Image (cartoon, rainbow, N blue to C red):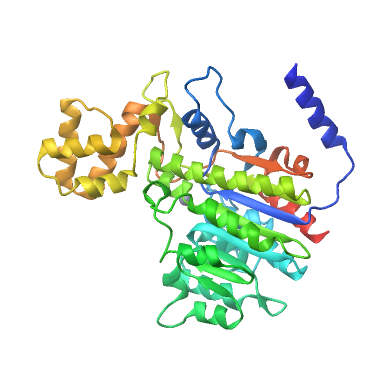
Amino acid sequence: MLKKTALMVCAALAAAPALAAPKNIIYMIGDGMGPAYLAAYRYYMDDPATKTVERTIFDELWVGVATTYPDDDTVVTDSAAAATALATTHKTYNGAISVDHQHHNLTTMLEIAKAKGKTTGVVATAQINHATPASFIAHDPARRNYDAIADDFFDNRVHGKPVADLMLGGGTQYFIRKDRNLVEQFKSEGYQYADNWDGLRQLNKLPAMALLAPEGFVSTIDNPEPAPLKQMTEKALQLMSGSEKGFVVMIEGSQIDWCGHANDVACAMAEMRDFAESIKVAKAYVDSHPDTLLVITADHETGGLSLGANGQYAWKRDVIKKVKNSGDYIADQLLPLKDAATLYQAWLSFTSLPLSAEEQQLLVNARAEGQKTLAKAVKQRIDHHSLTGWTSGAHTAIDVPVLAYGADKAAFAGFQDNTDIAAKLIEFIQK
Ligand SMILES: [Zn+2]
């Protein structure tokens, strides 16, 4: 009965006349966050004391799905082509930062927003010149041209100003170089700047920039700074909320993807938690500012994550919940331990996961092969016991979730292409 009412409400929303465009847009991208990541997070967060599986913030806001294929015959997109689609409405080739096949610039929604006098920003836990945030601000034929892309953050201008009024993330090594100090250049144009977390908390006006790591941040699961994306999301919304003509901000959970590439499920769940907490902050902002639209999606899936593996009908999230660090971090700590018993004790301190004598020997053998092999063995033991599956160390072409909240959320319901999301948002920005 409840279901029927919800459906009727949805139908009523869809049939309603076009609403006024939102003043503010919060666009959140979970890099690599395919639908299995949302399902995994739901069961991972489930309260075992209750019979029902509690819905997560993702489940509450889920309205549709999107295709992610790039403009070539690979079907599987990379983050640059996907971010270009999500930022400009144009599909392009893998590796392109908001340029087409002929390397012509594709206008991004932040450029359009800036031209309309809106306040603009990007937030990421990667370096801010990484593919996703870069595709909203810069143009380059190759995502790996990190220095040139960083230069574009300053040199690419709308009405004589840099595209973004706010930039929070990592990347000092690209913005403070021997050949060019972009941070000093931004400062000379009036940008407040912070390079540590206390400094971030003290930022009090725009334009502003915080670069909190040389490249991407340390993985959230290993990071002594709690909930890094949530902290930046709070600061971003605080700084942008005063904007007279409204704001457009892209907030990326950058490293869900990196954990996926590493096939590290505990790492992925920690990133999902920080992303979920950031979404809660954004949702609360919409509740107190109803002229704001929140849209959340992923650029693609990473790793081919599956809940259940090896022919068994089970996925054991309790195994994952007890893992304290990333596989890489655990391997770093285990590597110097030559004695098998000491190694196993350390393993237990990081994972609380008992291993058979045979499995303990697997770890000892992997340790002798070096850090990479050991990290892989650590993650394989966790996957084996939790029945977590991975099909790839790269991306997959599965459709991604689309979530939305706010008065215009119905515009993102149902089946769509990633370029449709950008088209609707740009339509709102241009109104
Ligand atoms: Zn990736």
Q: Is residue 206 visible?
A: yes
Asked if one can make out residue 99 in the rendered structure from this viewpoint, the answer is no
Q: Residue 148 in the image: x percent, y percent?
A: 50, 74
x and y percent of residue 190 in the render?
A: 61, 79
In this rendering, the count of numbered labels is: 0
Image point (40%, 66%), residue name: 214
* Picture quadrant where residue 112 is located: bottom right
Q: Where does residue 86 sit, x and y in percent of width and height?
A: 64, 53
Asked if residue 209 is positioned above or below residue 221 in the image, the reply reads below
172 vs 293, left or right, is left
Q: Nearer the viewer, residue 302 or 153?
A: 153
Q: Quadrant of residue 391?
A: top left
The residue at 54%/66% (across/down) is: 202
Report the front residue among 352 and 79: 352
**Quarter of the image that includes the C terminus:** bottom right
Image position, residue 138 (x, y; %): 59, 68
Q: As rendered, which of 93 and 252 lies closer to the eye?
A: 252
Q: Say above or below: 33 vs 385.
A: below
Residue shown at the point (55%, 44%) measured from the top left:
277
Q: Is residue 312 above or below residue 77?
A: above
Residue at position x 43%, y 59% in the image: 216
Answer above or below: position of 295 versus 119.
Answer: above
Furthest residue toward left: 339
Picture quarter with the N terminus: top right
Quadrant assignment, res 53:
top right
Q: Is residue 372 left or right of residue 88?
A: left
